[in-house]
Image: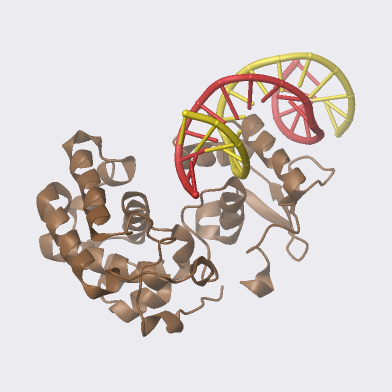
Chain colours: A brown, B yellow, C red
Amino acid sequence: MVCQTLGQHLSNPRWPETIYKPVASVGQLSIKAEGIKSASNGAWNTTACDSYWTSVHPEYWTKRHVWEWLQFCCDQYKLDANCISFCHFNISGLQLCGMTQEEFMEAAGVCGEYLYFILQSIRSQGYSFFNDPDETKATLKDYADSSCLKTSGIKSQDCHSHSRTSLQSSHLWEFVRDLLLSPEENCGILEWEDREQGIFRVVKSEALAKMWGQRKKNDRMTYEKLSRALRYYYKTGILERVDRRLVYKFGKNAHGWQEDKL
DNA sequence: CGGCTGTTTCCTGATT
DNA sequence: TAATCAGGAAACAGCC
C-alpha cells in the first residue's frame, strides 16, 4: 500500500470546512466541546465508554487502542476519516506518541494537525481529558483561537485525494471497498476475485452485515437488507451486476479501489 | 421547512 | 428448503 504525503499543506496549515465542518468559527468549536460535556454526563458513544483506552496513558495503547482513538476523534470532532491514512496509524501508542506534528500531517493532512493537538492534550491531561469537559472545552477553544484554525479554504479534493483505507466511511460501498483494502479488518469476510477488474466476493455475508450494522449502530442489519442497498448501486454505476451469487464488481463511478491508483 | 440522497425495511416472486 | 437475487414501494435520517 502506498501512502501519499500532503507536503503542500505543511507550509500553510488551514482548516477546510469540508474536513472539520463545525469550525466555521471559533464559537462553533465551543459548541462541539459542549457535545463532549453532554456526552460525559452519561451518554458517551460506544467508542469512548466501552473501551478502557480512555483510562490508559497513550504510550501504553495497543494498535487497537490507537484505532479506537482515531474512531473516537472522527466521531467526536467530525473529522473526515477519508483524510486519514490508516497505514500510517497501524502502530502502537508508544510509536504514536513519538510522531511529530509533521508526521501527523503527512499521515492525515490537515486532520493530522488536529489529531496531534488532541493527542498532546490527552497526554498532558490524562484521564481528566475525558472527564473534565470544562477543561477540554477551554483547551480546544485555545487551540481554535490559534492562527491555524482561523482560516479555511483548502478545497475538498485536497483532502480526498489523500484518501486511503479509511477507518470510517459514510457510504456502504466505501465501507466495502475499505474492507477489501484492509486485510487486518477484513478477516476473510470479503475477497477479491479479480483484482484488476474490481470483482469481489462476499465470503461471510452475515459477518459483513453485522459489521455494517455495527458501523451504522443498527443491530437489525441483515445481508438481505445490505444487499438491497448494494443493488441500488447498479443504477448509479458504483457497482456492476455479476451473475453469480455473492459476487459484485466495482463500476465506473466507484473510485479508490484500483491497485495502481492507490 | 422542503427537497434530495442514501440507505433501511418490507415485500413478492424468481433462481440456485 | 434455505439462501440469494431482483426490484418496487415506502419510511427514514442526515444534509443543504
> Does residue A40 lie above or below A193 as drawn?
above
At a point 31% along the width and 65% down the height, the residue shown is: A115
Q: In which image quadrant can residue B7 be found? A: top right
Comparing A202 with A257, the one in front is A257
User: Residue A48, image x and y in percent?
Assistant: 28, 46
Q: Is residue A163 left or right of residue A151?
A: right
Q: Can residue A247 be seen by looking at this rendering?
A: no
Quadrant location of the N terminus of chain A? bottom right
Instruction: State the residue at coordinates (17%, 64%).
Output: A121
Q: Is residue A85 above or below residue A36?
A: below
Percent coordinates x, y for residue A190 in the rendering: 64, 50
Residue located 59% across and 30% down the image: A222
- Would residue A95 be visible to someone looking at this image? yes
Residue A110 percent coordinates (x, y):
38, 71
Of A58 and A133, the residue lying toward us: A133
Name the quarter where the C terminus of chain A is drawn: bottom right
Q: Is residue A34 left or right of residue A201?
A: left
**Nearest to the observer: residue A210 or residue A27:** A27
* Of the pair A148 and A109, the residue shown nearer to us: A148
Q: Is residue A177 above or below residue A208?
A: below
Image check: A213 left or right of A245? left
Left or right placement of residue C8 versus residue A113 in this view? right
**Residue A40: where, in percent of width, then height?**
18, 41
